[in-house]
Amino acid sequence: MRRWLLSPRGLFWGFFLLVAGTISAQFLVIGTGTLPELADGMPRTRFIQLLLGTWLLSLLVLGFAWRELDRRFVRPIAAVAKGAAILTHTDSEHSLEVPKGHWLQELPTNVQYLGDKLQQTRNDMEKSFASWSERLERQKQSLETVLRELDAAVLVCDNEGRILLYNPAAQRILAGHEALGLGRSLYDICARAPVEHTLELLQLRRDTDDGKAGSAEFVCATTGHGPLLHCRLSLLPAEDGGFVLGFENAGARIERLVRRDSALRHAVENLRSPLTNLRAAAETLSAGHAMDPVTQDTFLTMLERESQALSERFEGLVKVSQERLSSRWTMADIRSRDLIDSVLRHGLEQLPQLEQTGRPLWLHAESLSLGFLLGHLLQQLKSYGIPYVNVEALLGNRWVYLDIVWEGKPIPADTLSNWLSKPLAYGEGLTGNEVLERHDSEAWSQEHGREGYALLRLPLPASQRQWEHAGPDRLPPRPEFYDFSLSEQRAPLADLASTRLDDLHYVVFDTETTGLRPSEGDRIISLAAIRVVNGRILYNEAFERIVNPERKIPAASTRFHGITDADVNDAPTIGTVLPAFRNFVGDAVLVAHNAAFDMKFLQLQEANTGVRFDNPVLDTLLLSFYLHDHTPEHTLEAIAKRLGVKVEGRHTAAGDATTTAEIFVRLLELLRAHGIETLGQALGAAEEIVDVRRMQSRF
């Protein structure tokens, strides 16, 4: 309201009200004063009647003058001002919406001419930079080609863990993970501790080794039910900041190695029989008398020499086989807690109830095979009648002792040996003993220091990280390819109200429903969203789901959005879709057109799904009212036409979400031109419109 009162139109209203009040006050003073009879004998009553008529005529003339000035001057001026902002900041081809019969003479024509000149200037500037743009585009295409053809997955992140780049291989390995997206936090995808610890280690190396940091490998667990990742992390140059994370599915890699090692072991074992026969033949010939002495000696010498050489080769091959089977390059650093968590995610029903105590320690191990061994032993303990265990990692002399503790007696040696000789549910018949062999380890069971308890101990190689000093303190993490300017953003999330609009990430969404009354049982049948980062719409980072509303879709609604009961019969319910959408949204600001309608449907599902959306919400409808109060047209189509946005896929959740996103990007430019630069200011502007609309509804 204050904004309207201080606007030109509000001041114009105030001026005419002041003039009208002044005239009325003067007539009131004259009419109520003590006046003598007029010279011509006009009675006082007649004089007051003339005075009242004159007063009414004055107000009528004043009102007519105000109406004409408002219609022909004030409103057209406001329309020209709003249109000039659109021409300047969003759509240079916008046509001014000036009321007919205005008194602005050539002003609208000149402003439109300036808009045309602005568009021409922009075109000329684009042409002048065309050669540079083409060169940059060629470099970009070359980089895209290289990244696309890489078999290894690659993520580039800034110092705070926000994703600046990812390639198709990363999408394949992390297929279906809603948290993968530009500007999203890496720590929404994988465990934070292994990445941060490796960053500290490499930073320390760079600070103490003349700027040379190198790279480091580790194994990292992913969130949800994703795979274990075998990662290699390298720092970007210090002046740029950030790091490159290459990774692959640890399971697929180790499966290949197991198949290779199994074939090698099989080949080695097949040499035993020929060697045995060769030695036997040599011994037989050495005892024979059919050859003359010279020939026999020569023959025997040759057999002994060849068999000895073959034996040496066999022993060398066995040694190589063992080395390859436990090859150190297949090992990588992994935290004990991540290893145990990966086991729990894949076998909760078959495992005893498990509790982890103590601080996590770093292992240097082949995580997948070791995880299968640990899961195998836990299954055997449960089948042995042990319902509850505690797992703790203890640091020894360059070893980490992984102790599984329970109340009861130790496992007999022959029983444990039998468990370890069984094939694991992994690889080509790999046994527990073979996993321990490749880690130069063994397992045993003994009494625990606590009376009445026992333990099963697995000594495992400790990572060198256990003895590395921690690096410098790091800032707490924040949350299309090639948007490295994200790394320049440093707005803290602790105070969103003061965060600049340009520094925020947005998820623009839309719903299609069974009807228009959420409080009376209508439900969501389609939910779609698209991400906006750095003022850019990331079309490849979208969310779209059909939802089974578990009720009939009225024919009237189907005519509106085209979704039928047959379309939703096999679709997931809102209880499945909403958690996935919440994960996609993360901590982004939600944006919608007429957002109160869509948010009501989401909020009514909080009790059923346990999913709560407490993100800030911006409404393009309210922002359009705030910016363009010179027109009553604020439908999605009207705003799109005003801002030069092409409408496609209307009345589909995906189409409307995309249209709303394109409108929102243009509204951001106009908000900045009006001095609205922070989220708090944008929310305040929307609330101001809500107050105005609330007041209007009372009259």
Image: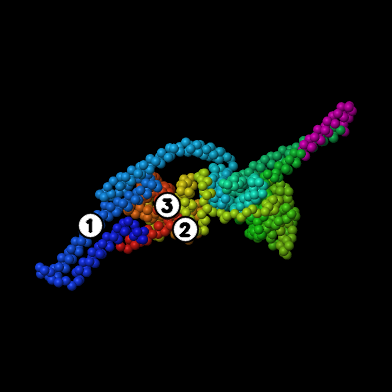
Magenta extent:
287-315
- Sequence-earlier tag: 1 or 2: 1
Quadrant where the image shows the N terminus: bottom left
Rate crowding at label 2 as few (under 14), some (14 to 19) or many (20 or more) other CA atoms within 10 Å: some
Mark 2 residue element = helix
- Return the residue at label 1: 64
Q: Nearer the viewer, residue 10 or 168?
A: 10
- Sequence-earlier tag: 1 or 3: 1
- Return the residue at label 2: 497
Apparent side of residue 234 relative to residue 18 in the rendered image (left or right):
right
Q: Amino acid at mark 2?
A: Ala
C-alpha gap between disc 1 and disc 3? 38 Å
Q: Is residue 332 visible?
A: no
- Name the residue at the left extreme: 40
The relative height of residue 297 versus residue 447 in the rendered view (above or below) is: above
Q: Amino acid at mark 3?
A: Arg
Apparent side of residue 356 relative to residue 130 in the rendered image (left or right):
right
Q: Nearer the viewer, residue 637 or 130?
A: 130
Q: Is residue 257 magenta?
A: no
Q: Nearer the viewer, mark 3 or mark 2?
A: 3
Q: Position of residue 599 (x, y in %)?
A: 43, 57
Callout 3 touching callout 2 (CB < 8 Å)? no
Among the 4 quarters of the image, the one containing residue 114: top left
Q: Amino acid at mark 1?
A: Phe
- Return the residue at label 3: 672
